Image: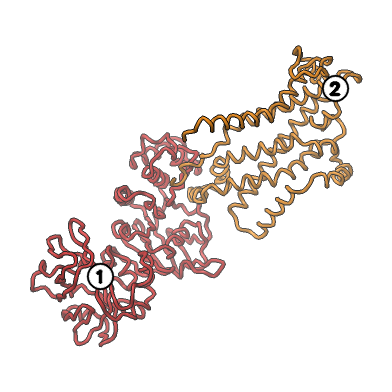
Amino acid sequence: MQRTGKEVALWSIGITVVLLYALIPVVWIISLSLKKPADIGDGRFLPKSVSFDNYDNVFSTDTFNSALRNSIGIALIATVISIALAALAAYAITRLEFTGKALILTGALAIAMFPPISIVGSLFDLWRRIGLFDTWIGLIIPYMTFSLPLAIYTLSAFFREIPWDLDKAAQVDRATPWQAFTKVMVPLAAPGVFTAAILVFIFAWNDFLFATVLTSTDASRTVPAALAFFTGASQFTDPTGAIAAAAVVVTIPIIIMVLIFQRRIVAGLTAGAVKG
Amino acid sequence: MAEIVFQDVTKRYPDGYEAVKSMDLEIADGEFMILVGPSGCGKSTALNMIAGLEDISDGELRIGGEVVNQKAPRDRDIAMVFQSYALYPHMSVRENMAFPLTIMKTPKDEANRRVEEAAEILDLKQHLDRKPSQLSGGQRQRVAMGRAIVRDPKAFLMDEPLSNLDAKLRVQMRAEVARLQDQLKTTMVYVTHDQTEAMTLGDRVAIMRAGMLQQVDSPMQLYNHPKNLFVAGFIGSPSMNFLPGRISDGVLKLPMGDIRLPESKRGELRTAPADKPLIVGIRPEDFEDAAVVGGDTEGATFKTTIDVLEAMGSEYYAHFTVKGEGQDMQDNVELRELQEDAGGGALASPDSFDVVARLDQTSGVRIHDPADIWINAAKIHFFDPESGQSLANR
């Protein structure tokens, strides 16, 4: 399609506005993290002189290192379990007729809509009684609960796209249902699996509510919660620079994840399966 | 290699609809059996029941003498080619064809050898490392067949495998399928809605309508001796013309005139339906331009005006209309279904009939001109208007 000069100009302006709107806060926080503690309040957008003191600071505290470990571990485990369960559930939902199917789907949707804040109080009490308070499992369970519906919906949309004839072909080719699922369905739904995995991971990684309420020590506190407890190098330094540095650090894994999986999230993987 | 036997097999859906009604069919070892019929006649359901993709509600299905009603598809040792080909898009052609062997844990060398062999037969050698999406329709179709033949299964099931190909390729692949079956000598069940495919490919053809087998016979038997109206109208292209008629004193009264039936023809009729309404079937090629036919052949000549004349090169298709009283034909379910299958809706009107005649290329008939058309009296078919059954003896 041929675009006129006016169209190009309007598009460029629009895109620039959106990019600025999205990226200025990010640049700002990076800039803050690179300032010397003394320059934090100088009101400049870019630092006068670049220093990595804040990063040194952040990584030298146990609080942050253990929080990073907790965040990565908890988010990864929650993602893996959630995707495995969601894939099985989504396959069953798209391919089988069973009573209660509609109930499962609406139930899942209801859970996704449910405001987490309404259950944290009772969850806090319950977790303390059964000893899950301040443990990895204690966070993995609510993360899975709230991310499963989304993962099931995403994956069933992808499974629905896969022609039913492929299941049948696999069956006739002597595959067991499990083999058909793992060798044919899952590879074909790979874009969906990765999309769902990213969504679940980001949800778990970014969560603040459960992380503050259900943890109390470095044993399981994740980065978003740990940031709130941040102090500077000493009790008396302004922690702004350190918090900014920590915020940049926690953003990096997300950016890496998206960049890696972006290439996998390509449509057209099923092209050629059936006449097209 | 094995024979496949349907014994009183019924497929009933939970809502009570019966897609296949107590079907009895024996497919011999090594036979090429075609299941044909209009859409919704139950032919694909029957095939899926052989594959194990559909449960059998009633009756018994045996493959190689073994009852397989309760067996999963993977335990039946059959291979299937789907209409959509159902190739695994994330695997190369080689992996696609080797998939069943991989599942069966066939040793690598052996699997490779068999894939190469199949690729050789199907002319796919240079495509083995490409993905299905990079292949043309005909090549994909061959990969699907390759995946079936590497396994050396008890039987091949084909579900309209050629219907996604364009006309020219279809004719070419049709010959290839026939050659393949001849080479492998494996039992093959082939579902199609195309009567030409059915006629050209099968050792025997089973015609289905509304979940019921109408007739199972060799293509020529079906053509020359259809058991009922449906079979008569379904087989043959252009299809058989149906007209209302009556027989009295050995003379057939047709809308276009009276025909004295030859002695042999009268003997063929099961009962002498004295002066009762009949449905008369005449194939297009049993008409001829009277000028082309010699005078001494048995039949009758009538005058008509040609409405449409289609030149086919080797012959002409001449369309003309005759008037007659045909309420019985209007009421016949089978005729109505045939008409719908041909896309024509209901019969145009109860008292006027479109007739197609195949005339020799030397015929001098011209459109809108009166023409003398001859009917071959020896080739006329008679059907009971109520039951639709053929009135012939055999």
Image location (x, y in percent) of residue B72: 53, 55
Q: Residue furthest right?
A: A236
- Discs 2 and 1 carry the same chain letter: no
Q: Amino acid at mark 1?
A: Val
Q: Position of residue A21 (x, y in %)?
A: 69, 30
Q: Report whether residue A223 is seen.
A: yes
Q: Secondary structure at mark 1?
A: strand
Give the total number of marks visible in the rendering: 2
Give the crowd class for mark 1: few <14, some 14-19, many >=20 residues within 10 Å.
many
Chain B colour is: red
At 43% across and 69% down in the image, what residue appears?
B210
Is B247 or A92 nearer to us in this picture?
B247
Is the image coloured rainbow, by chain, by secondary structure, or in one colour? by chain
Question: What colour denotes chain A?
Answer: orange
Q: Given the image, what chain letter belongs to the residue carrying mark 1?
A: B
Q: How far is disc 2 from disc 1 in space, using C-alphas? A: 96 Å
Residue indicated by mark 2: A239
Q: Are discs 2 and 1 less than 8 Å apart at CB?
A: no
Does residue A128 sit above or below A31 in this rendering? below
Q: Residue at x 37, y 55 (%)?
A: B188
* Pointer 1 residue: B355
